[in-house]
Image (cartoon, rainbow, N blue to C red):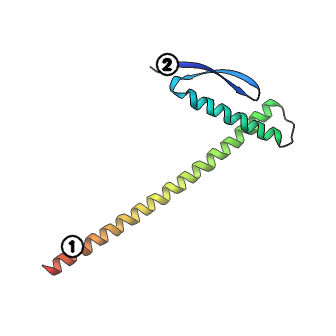
Amino acid sequence: MTQQETITVAIFDKDYQISCPANEVQALRDSAFYLDQKMREIKSSGSILGLDRLAVMAALNITNDFLAADRGNQSAQASLEAQSHSLEGSTLKVDQLIDALKAAGA
């Protein structure tokens, strides 16, 4: 069983105590820092928004970034699979040519 740890993170000048598995503490700290930075970025854009609206806008921006990266990963994976199939086909053709040359020389 994974040991839980309670840590305090600061997001937009407010402290939150959050429990997480001990092996995920740094990831949680990094996530809180990233969220804090996104909220400050939105706040500095000029609009004076309430904390709830800032949090929602930050969540939407982060989700959009994540989905764009995920689409990019899926596209790269599809391209890699296509290249792999092409390489397999080329390897098969080379093997067939080698076999034909061996048979002709025998």
**Viewer-closest of 31 and 1:** 31
Residue 89, position in %: x, y?
A: 35, 67
Residue at left offset 18%, top offset 76%: 102
Residue type (three-letter) at the residue carrying disc 1: Asp
Residue 11, position in %: x, y?
A: 72, 28
> What crowding class fits label 2: few (fewer than 14 Cα within 10 Å), some (14-19), or many (20 or more)?
few
**Viewer-closest of 51 and 14:** 14
Q: Is 78 on the left-hand or right-hand side of 11?
A: left
Q: Is 34 on the left-hand or right-hand side of 41?
A: left
Residue type (three-letter) at the residue carrying disc 2: Gln
Q: Please tell me how many numbered marks the rendered image carries.
A: 2
Residue identified by numbered label 2: 3
Q: Is residue 24 above or below residue 78?
A: above
Discs 1/2, front: 2
Residue identified by numbered label 1: 99
Q: Is residue 27 above or below residue 68?
A: above
